[in-house]
Image: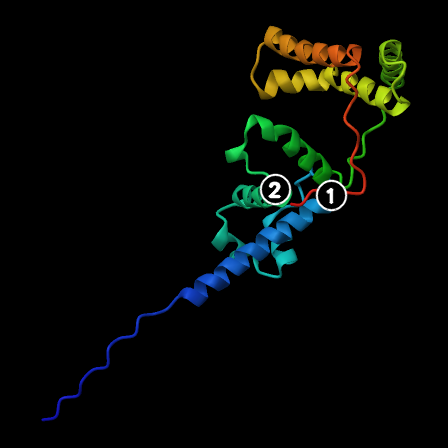
Amino acid sequence: MTRTTASPKRRYDNTRRRARADETRARIVTAGAELVRQSSIRDWHGVTIRAVAERADVNERTVYRHFANERALRDAVMQRLEQAVGIDLTQLQLDDIGDAATRIFRHVALYPRDRRPPLDPTLAEANRRQHEALLGAVNQCAVRWPAADRTLAAAMLDVLWGVSSYERVLLDWNLDTEEAVRGMTWVIRLVEDAIRNGERPPPARRGRRDRA
């Protein structure tokens, strides 16, 4: 009786399969990022499983293979956007914050702007008077500054004493009223001192883009 020697079993090489899965996942995340770029950076209503699947040219079941739910998908898209800006929040140092803010603002500038609903006439008038008052106060101490710098300084003060800025500090950071007021007025005084000391805003860099 002749015995036949069984050929050794070949190990299944799933390298290609993993590579294809990684490519599909990357395509799905890219599709989500593209959907965000079509609207405001703050509007993520369009980043749904169905919309992303259509954009990536895959079926919804494929999306669910890579992401357990819509929240997981959106988190991956947000990480992709952070990578595109060139920011790693896990490695952020104090000296990096200014550069990080610059990168974020310039990236956000590429998105369509939210359409703000018109203010109530009373609020619009109060807003106008506030702008004029702030600009007048800055002009008293920065008369030699270019008009653009004076306007910018007044705009920064406007943001700092804005109710929405105060509410964000209060709610997002879970501070009590006095702590929120202390923080906001601290930064306002820093800007006031800079204006009194003739410390103009740094010149704008025009015609350049930070590398992502």
- Count of marks placed on residues: 2
Q: What residue do we see at 87% from left, 11% from top?
A: 133
**Hey, what amino acid is under mark 1?**
Arg
Q: Using the image as rendered, state which of residue 53 and residue 159 is in the foreground.
A: 159
Q: Say whether residue 94 is left or right of residue 165.
A: left
Earlier in the chain: of badge 1 and badge 2, it is: 2
Q: What residue do we see at 75% from left, 14% from top?
A: 194
Find residue 102 and report its image quarter: top right
Quarter the C terminus occupies: top right
Q: Say whether residue 172 is left or right of residue 163.
A: left
Residue 23, percent across and down?
53, 60
Find residue 55 and report its image quarter: bottom right
Residue at the extreme top of the image, as rendered:
178
Q: Is residue 125 above or below residue 15?
A: above
For the residues marked 1 and 2, what is the alpha-carbon distance in whole angstroms? 12 Å
Q: Which residue is denoted by mark 2 in the rendering?
A: 86
Q: Which residue is denoted by mark 1 in the rendering?
A: 209
Neighbours of disc 1 within 10 Å: few (<14), some (14-19), many (20+): few
Q: Is residue 145 above or below residue 62?
A: above
Q: Which circle marks residue 142 in the picture?
A: none
Q: Say whether residue 51 is left or right of residue 147.
A: left
**Hey, what amino acid is under mark 2?**
Gly
Residue 22, percent across and down?
50, 58
Neighbours of disc 2 within 10 Å: few (<14), some (14-19), many (20+): some
Quarter the N terminus occupies: bottom left
Label 2 element class: loop
Find residue 142 and report its image quarter: top right
Q: Say whether residue 125 is left or right of residue 115.
A: right
Residue 82, percent across and down?
60, 41
